[in-house]
Amino acid sequence: MVYQPKRRKLTAEINVVPYIDVMLVLLIIFMVTSPFVTQGVEVELPQTTTAQSAAELAKEKDNGAFIIVEVNKDGALGLSVNNAEMQRGFSLQNLLLRVKAELEINAQATVLVGGDGRVPYSEIVLTLDALNQVGVSSVGLMTEPFEK
């Protein structure tokens, strides 16, 4: 008797488990890095008819107190508290100290930030970030000059 080995049938299958592992790793990488990839788009903002004026916003709160922080076209900072005359020429640190002191006096005061149309947007963002760091949690952005 002669021994004859059994012929096995050849199968052409691909092991997909390593490919699935690679795809999951790539998915995780894309999910982690996607928040860091931001792109800016130039837009033309519409004029609003439903935005509240600063006076209406301040009257809406019980105390009616408000603090206006202004950034002019040169990046200089100004401050007005409760409809007082705008004081200009503040450094960022002095402005933050003054806003913090006003909020300690009246914690319900509305904080509004306005900027000249010619000021770089980065100046407004830096001002907003600095206000956030001293504890201002809610800020209104002014869309037109404040009228007394």
Image: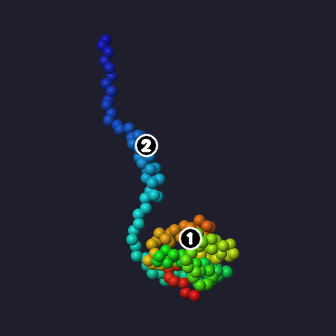
Percent position (x, y) of residue 40? 41, 66
Tell me which residue sits at (46%, 77%) in the image: 73
User: Can you say which quadrant of the picture contains the C terminus?
Assistant: bottom right
Between disc 1 and disc 2, whose residue precedes?
2
Q: Name, please, the residue furthest toward the bottom.
A: 148
Is residue 68 among what the camera can see?
A: no
- Residue at 40% x, 73% y: name it: 43
Callout in the foreground (1, 2): 1
**x%, y% of residue 81?**
62, 80
Q: Three-letter amino acid code at disc 2?
A: Asp
- Looking at the image, residue 57 sits to the left or right of residue 4; the answer is right
4 vs 100, left or right, is: left
Q: Which residue is mark 2?
A: 21
Q: Is residue 11 above or below residue 80?
A: above
Q: x, y (%) of residue 48?
A: 47, 81
Task: Tell which residue pokes out farthest to the right in this image.
Answer: 105
* Towards the viewer: 147 or 2: 147
Judged from the image, the secondary structure of the residue bearing numbered disc 1 is helix
- Could you give the CA–CA distance between mark 1 and mark 2, rounded to whole angstroms? 51 Å
State the residue position of label 1.
92
Q: With 137 as the anchor, is 15 left or right in this view?
A: left
